[in-house]
Every structure is written in structure tokens, then in C-alpha cells.
Amino acid sequence: MSASSGIRFDSVTVAYDGNVVLDALDLTVGPGEVMALLGPSGSGKTTALRAVAGFVRPASGRVLLGDRDVTGLPPHRRGIGMVVQSYALFPHMRVEDNVAFGLKARKVSRAEIRERVGEALEMTGMAAYARRHPRELSGGQQQRVAIARALAIRPGVLLLDEPLSALDAQLRSGMLAELARLHRELPDVSMLYVTHDQVEALTLADRIAVMDNARLRACGTPRALYRAPADAFTASFVGGANLLPVTVGVAGVSFGDAEIKVATEGVAPGATATLCVRPHLVGLGDGPNRLTGTVGEVQWRGATHRLLVDVAGHRVMADVRELRTPPVVGEAVRLHFASDDVVLLPAGVGRG
Ligand SMILES: Nc1ncnc2c1ncn2[C@@H]1O[C@H](COP(=O)(O)OP(=O)(O)OP(=O)(O)O)[C@@H](O)[C@H]1O
Ligand SMILES: [Mg+2]
């Protein structure tokens, strides 16, 4: 591998025809760190990756790999591997030639190419398929080849743009485990990983960066963003959340008729705010912070039941352990949650 480096966006702005699609992004991915990029469609995730890879030139700001300013360097001189959703293999080339492609372009010797192609195919479990063409492979196998191709150049940085989203759910979870293993085998490689899938982000990432409309909205460990999101947008993007509009009182907040005990420091009494309650932390039946409502929908999900309960004009999601006799639609029920399990956020909607 080339020297472990890490990635630094130093106030990177990208514009197309005067439209700013990445707005002064400051973000650092440490050496060997996996950073997931989450955010709605069009928020600038792919653009951020392309700026690192060198496929798009920032209007201002700098991209650094380690302490090397690469803003002006062409893509092939950056030492970066990139994997995209659509595999992008050359259909007329055998697997081994696809994997060798970047090395040939870099004028690596034939002996060295043979060694590195073998190593990359071994790492991705594709050594037995070296002589095949892409059309003779499944989607998952093609994506492994694409990953092998990215690894063959021994990159210091690996960029992954929704690499698993074209695969079906079962394959995705298998490949997710493979990517985690790859990262353990290549502990110095920094990864920037775009995904729509929260499970991927929570499983793989050391930290998550949440993008919203060309800007970085939040960045932190999965745990911190999940347990203590700074705003409703981040809460809804990192894990499912009930976002309840509440009115702040002295010792807590009110939601409909219910009084909820929660820390309110920093929020003025009388203000409106948003209470973030994770569905799996809502209990059915009596308890602290009780809500009373009517069951609107019951979804059986195997190990759990998801109850959608109408409370004060809002649908509250509660994921409870599978019930022997779940409530029926129209039934009056009580829900509760612990004060420690909820977070009070500034007023505002989640993702829209
Ligand atoms: N080559 C281009 N020319 C003009 N506008 C572009 C170009 N590429 C991207 N954009 C615009 O830049 C914005 C950000 O696009 P980008 O591809 O980075 O979004 P994204 O977060 O990756 O979205 P998705 O989740 O849908 O892949 C979008 O509004 C898009 O239309
Ligand atoms: Mg994209």
C-alpha cells in the first residue's frame, strides 16, 4: 500500500454552472478510518467523492491526502481506488485484465502486475474466476472484481459510492461482512463510503458524516449520532425516530395531554421543540412518561411487532418484542419510555 494518508477536505466548494452543489466542505478522514457519507439524493455525496478522486475540480478549497495537496493532480496520480454502484467493468476483458487495468496504465512491470492481480483476487475471493468475462459472473461477483480492481493499485484511500446498492438484501449483508474483513486486512486504508443504507453505515463506519443540501450537517461516531443527534434531520437519517412536536415547560415538555420529564436546559419555557424517541425504546403499557393513544396499524416483523399508535394527532412508532396477543387496530393503548432514552432537539422537521 502507499503510505497511509487520510483525506482532508479543506473548505471544498464545487459548483456546476454557478450552482453550488458542495458548499465549503470541511471534513477529515483519518488514516485507516472508515467514514460513511449519508444524506438525501442530490445532497452532494458523489460530488464529494469525485472531488477526492480528481474527477471534478473544486471552485475553491483544497483536497489533501496526508499532507499532500492533490487538488491539482490528475486522478491516476492520487493513489486512490474507487468503486461505484454499477461495477463499471470492461465487458470485453477477462476478470484478470479488468483488475490489471490500472496497473498497466501505471506502467507497472508484468511480474508485479501478476503478483498484485493475484493478491487482489485472493483478497476478494475471486481467484477462481480470473479467466472469466464479466457477463459470466453474478452481480455480487462483478462487484468483488470491481473491488479487486480498486485494491490492485494498493491505494491509500478507497472511495466507495453505494457499492452494494445494486445487490439483493442477502448478498448485501454477506458483502458487508466481506468489506469489514477487508478493512481489517488493510487497516491503513482510509475509506469514504457513500450509502443510503443505515445498517451499512452503522456497521462499517468509524464515523458518519451527514450531508444535507450541499452542506455537512453533522459528523460523529454512529453511537453519538444515534444516541444524541444534534437536530431532527440527523436523528431521522441515523436510525428511525419518532419526532414529536412538544411544548417546553419548566421540568419537562408536554405532548398533547401528556407530560414528559426530560432535561430542558438551554430551551426557554413556552418554546416549541422536537422530542426524538427511538421506536425500540418505546414500551407498551403503563410506565413513566405515559402516552395514551389508539392503535392505527400493527406490523408483525418476526422478532418484533411495530405498532403505529395515534397520539394527539401524531403517529408514534413503537417496536416491541413479538407479542402473543398483539393489540388490534382501534384499540386504546398506553405507551411509555424512559426519560434517559429521549433527546430534546430544536424545533424542526426531519428529512423532508
Ligand atoms: N455533471 C454535473 N453537472 C451538473 N450538475 C451536476 C452534475 N453532477 C451532479 N450535479 C448536481 O449536483 C448535485 C449533487 O449531486 P450528487 O451526485 O453529488 O448527489 P448525491 O448526494 O450523490 O445524490 P444520490 O444519493 O442521488 O446519488 C445534484 O443536484 C446534481 O444534480
Ligand atoms: Mg450519488
Image (cartoon, rainbow, N blue to C red):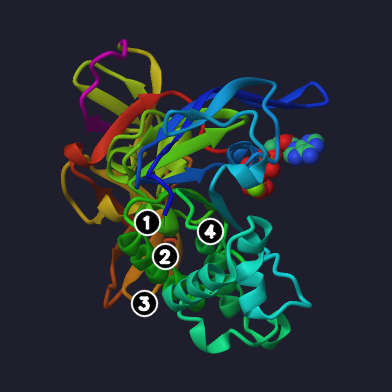
Type of the residue with mark 4: Ile
Q: Is mark 2 within 8 Å of ligand 2?
A: no
Rendered-image quadrant of the N terminus? bottom left
Q: Which residues are magenta?
A: 259-268
Label 1 residue SS: helix
Rendered-image quadrant of the C terminus? top right
Q: Point out the frontmost of discs 3 and 4.
A: 4
Mark 4 — residue?
Answer: 153
Choose between 196 and 58: the one closer to the eye.
Answer: 58
Residue 108: image location, x then y, percent: 59, 61
Earlier sequence position, callout 1 versus callout 3: 1
Residue 205: image location, x then y, percent: 37, 50
Quadrant of the image where one finds ligand 1: top right
Type of the residue with mark 1: Leu
Label 4 residue SS: loop
Residue at 26% from the left image edge and 78% from the top image edge: 324
Earlier sequence position, callout 1 versus callout 2: 2
Where, by quadrant of the figure, is residue 221 drawn?
top left
Earlier sequence position, callout 3 versus callout 4: 4
Mark 2 surroundings: few (<14), some (14-19) or many (≥20) residues within 10 A: some
Labels 1 and 2 touching (C-beta < 8 A): yes
What distance separates the C-alpha of mark 3 from that of mark 4?
A: 44 Å
Q: Residue furthest right?
A: 17
Specify the label residue 302 is tagged with: 3
Q: Point out the frontmost of discs 1 and 2.
A: 2
